[in-house]
Amino acid sequence: MLIVNTETVPGQRIVKALGVVKGNTVQAKHLGKDIIGGLRNLVGGRMTEYEEMFIESREFAESEMIKEAEKLGANAIVNVRYTTSSIMDGSSEVLVYGTAVLIEDE
């Protein structure tokens, strides 16, 4: 599945738009990692515990979006966007969405 954040794909022609597809997840870190992340917030440094959480969340949400596009018969998703929001301390939602399309070489 080709995934781009542009409205078109260079060298490809969109022959059919199949609709908006999305994937999302809400995840929280283990309490111990949340405490470590809180300490890093006080003393500074990379918060790898939260980086891991967001990487996992983005990958899961993206795979859900791809599954939805595949069900529609798409071979690409264009104009992809990611958004995040905090649900409560230590947990966040990641939403990814785009337009499922059929493309072919020009």
Image (tube, helix red, strand yellow):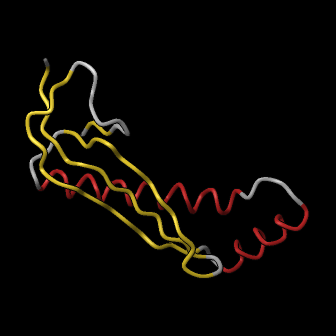
Q: Residue furthest front?
A: 7
The x, y position of residue 15, in whole percent, is 8, 34
Which residue is painted at 12% across and 38% down in the image? 102
Which residue is painted at 28% across and 41% down in the image? 78
Q: Nearer the viewer, residue 9 or 57?
A: 9
Q: Nearer the viewer, residue 106 or 65?
A: 106
Which residue is painted at 33% across and 55% down in the image? 97
Q: Quadrant of the N terminus?
A: top left
The x, y position of residue 99, in whole percent, is 24, 48
Report the side of 79 relative to 90 (left or right).
left
Report the side of 58 relative to 70 (left or right).
right
Is residue 16 placed above or below 72 in the rendered structure? above
The x, y position of residue 38, in whole percent, is 79, 72
Which residue is painted at 10% across and 53% down in the image? 72
Is residue 20 placed above or below 87 in the rendered structure? above
Q: Nearer the viewer, residue 99 or 2?
A: 99
Asked where in the image residue 76 lies, by quadrant, the reply is: top left
Report the side of 55 relative to 43 (left or right).
left
Asked where in the image residue 20 lies, by quadrant, the reply is: bottom left
The x, y position of residue 75, in whole percent, is 16, 39
